[in-house]
Image (cartoon, rainbow, N blue to C red):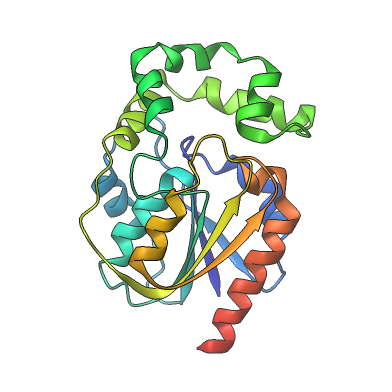
């Protein structure tokens, strides 16, 4: 079974490294990264991902944060080989209206280019226990991403509106309990629209795949193997 990883706002997939290394050995992994230079709206990103999905093997999509709406759009196209979806700290509407309103009001996208203090990154994103290596990698990725791309993706989130739909596939949701970016009630939107959904909670920040890589990998491996047995 192949696991397709769709990254968060950075779009690079580079923050998945430790998580991938911790997955069960029988799981093949493909990460679909997004262009750093192109400003693609959610429907365009869904088309971009669809053109890169396997056509000759079954797979599960794991959608981190920003990519959740992409996975939802894909699920509505009745993809032949898609077996399940795993959402991680994701959303189906603007997940934090106050925070994103401030982001649009203030030049925060520019500030991201100048290495936010470590305590801010730890508090809001990676968790208090994030090591120096992870912090350095995180800031390096932010610095490389063009400001206009960050701004465009934040605007996509701010204006996010999805048409009514139902996902009939098995759905799993990994919810970090100390998420300061995605408000708690966002999970209930998935409950309303997914026929079958399993919730897995973990103590940790928004970037839960990075802060609790092994725990998340263990759960995802269980989800994948459960799906394999059900086929």
Residue 51 visible in the shown view:
no
The residue drawn where x is 39% and y is 19% is: 102
Residue 192 visible in the shown view:
yes
**Residue 63 left/right relative to 152:** right
Q: Is residue 14 above or below residue 78?
A: above
Quadrant housing residue 28: bottom right
Q: Is residue 24 above or below residue 72?
A: below
Q: Is residue 167 above or below residue 46?
A: below
What is the quadrant of the N terminus in the image?
bottom right
Quadrant housing residue 41: top left
**Residue 170 left/right relative to 129:** left
**Residue 174 left/right relative to 110:** right
Q: Is residue 119 above or below residue 213?
A: above
The residue drawn where x is 70% and y is 19% is: 118
Residue 81's spot in the image, x, y percent?
39, 76
Give the camera-side residue of 125 and 138: 125
């Amino acid at each position: 079974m192949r696991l397709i990883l769709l990254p968060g706002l950075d779009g690079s997939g580079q923050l998945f490294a430790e998580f991938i290394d911790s997955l069960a050995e029988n799981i093949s992994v493909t990460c679909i990264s997004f262009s750093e230079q192109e400003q693609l709206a959610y429907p365009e990103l869904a088309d971009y991902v669809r053109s890169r999905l396997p056509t000759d093997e079954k797979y599960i999509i794991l959608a981190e944060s920003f990519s959740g709406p992409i996975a939802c759009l894909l699920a509505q196209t009745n993809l032949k080989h898609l077996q399940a979806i795993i959402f991680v700290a994701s959303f189906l509407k603007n997940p934090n209206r106050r925070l994103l309103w401030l982001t649009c009001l203030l030049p925060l996208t520019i500030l991201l280019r100048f290495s936010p203090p470590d305590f801010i990154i730890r508090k809001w994103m990676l968790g208090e226990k994030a090591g120096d290596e992870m912090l350095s990698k995180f800031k390096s990725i932010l610095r490389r991403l063009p400001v206009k791309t960050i701004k465009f993706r934040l605007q996509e989130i701010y204006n996010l509106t999805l048409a009514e739909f139902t996902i009939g596939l098995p759905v799993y949701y990994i919810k970090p309990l100390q998420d300061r970016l995605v408000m708690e009630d966002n999970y209930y939107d998935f409950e309303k629209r997914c026929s079958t959904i399993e919730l897995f909670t973990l103590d940790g920040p928004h970037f839960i795949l990075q802060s609790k890589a092994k725990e998340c990998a263990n759960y995802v491996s269980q989800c994948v193997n459960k799906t394999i047995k059900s086929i």
